Image: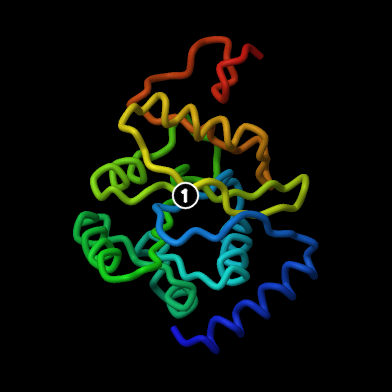
């Protein structure tokens, strides 16, 4: 993508964010498996795209193949979305990771919540890919009450699933989505259910 293209995107994103009164925060990452949360609305994708355009970075966002049919297809490709072949997801991911070895900047976006509705667990794909490749995890977020969208920390996973997810839960504990009641607490199925009588974020009793 040309420098002029990035400049046009950045100018457009600045204008739209200012118009909608959303502000951006955080240091722009260079390499990471990008997790964005809370994911409770279709607007999350739009706001996150504006963040990346404002930051002059391109993310490769894994999206269901069905979104690449019809009039949405050109829009999806233009925003860096990549069709995920659910019959052979490994091939899609391997092709993207080949790019990671060649590109200085590499951000692979994965919707860890998997749905805009409240669920029991996050999907563990981001965790497995990060551990298998050594690419760190980057946490992106939006917080609807403060109208803030931003880049959170980038860090290496340790392989201790509980400890790693505790760190992720702590970061997202004070972030609220556009439809806050639909957010899924960051917890992987590998951890088992949240302890009875806790809120699932920091272990504190509700």
Q: Position of residue 13 (x, y in %)?
A: 66, 73
Q: Which residue shows up at 67% across the image and 43% down it?
A: 179
State whether residue 87 appears in this view: no
Q: Residues within 10 Å of mark 1 (few under 14, many from 20)?
A: many
Q: Position of residue 9 (x, y in %)?
A: 60, 79
Q: Quadrant of residue 123?
A: top left
Q: Position of residue 10 (x, y in %)?
A: 63, 77
Q: Nearer the viewer, residue 42 or 199?
A: 199
Residue under pointer 1: 138
Indicate the quadrant containing the N terminus: top left, top right, bottom left or bottom right: bottom left
Q: Which residue shows up at 61% across the image and 64% down it?
A: 51
Q: Is residue 50 left or right of residue 91?
A: right
Q: Is residue 39 left or right of residue 158?
A: right
Image vertical order of residue 119 relative to residue 32, above or below? above
Q: Position of residue 92 (x, y in %)?
A: 25, 62
Q: Which residue shows up at 40% across the image and 67% down it?
A: 105
Q: Which residue shows up at 66% across the image and 44% down it?
A: 177
Q: Is residue 198 left or right of residue 105?
A: right
Image vertical order of residue 64 relative to residue 37, above or below? below
SS at circle 1: strand
Q: Nearer the viewer, residue 187 or 84?
A: 187
Q: Quadrant of residue 80?
A: bottom left
């Amino acid at each position: 993508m040309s420098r002029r293209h990035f400049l046009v995107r950045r100018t457009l994103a600045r204008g739209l964010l200012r118009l909608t009164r959303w502000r951006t925060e955080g240091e722009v990452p260079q390499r990471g498996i990008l997790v964005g949360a809370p994911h409770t609305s279709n607007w999350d994708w739009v706001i996150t795209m504006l963040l990346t355009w404002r930051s002059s970075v391109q993310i490769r966002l894994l999206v269901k193949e069905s979104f690449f049919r019809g009039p949405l297809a050109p829009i999806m490709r233009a925003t860096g979305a990549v069709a995920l072949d659910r019959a052979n997801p490994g091939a899609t991911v391997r092709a993207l990771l080949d790019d990671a070895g060649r590109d200085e900047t590499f951000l692979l976006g994965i919707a860890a919540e998997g749905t805009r509705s409240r669920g029991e667990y996050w999907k563990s794909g981001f965790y497995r890919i990060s551990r298998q490749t050594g690419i760190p995890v980057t946490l992106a977020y939006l917080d609807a009450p403060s109208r803030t969208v931003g880049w959170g920390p980038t860090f290496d996973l340790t392989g201790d699933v509980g400890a790693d997810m505790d760190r992720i839960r702590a970061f997202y504990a004070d972030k609220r989505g556009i439809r806050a009641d639909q957010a899924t607490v960051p917890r992987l199925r590998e951890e088992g259910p949240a302890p009875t009588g806790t809120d699932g974020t920091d272990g504190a009793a509700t």
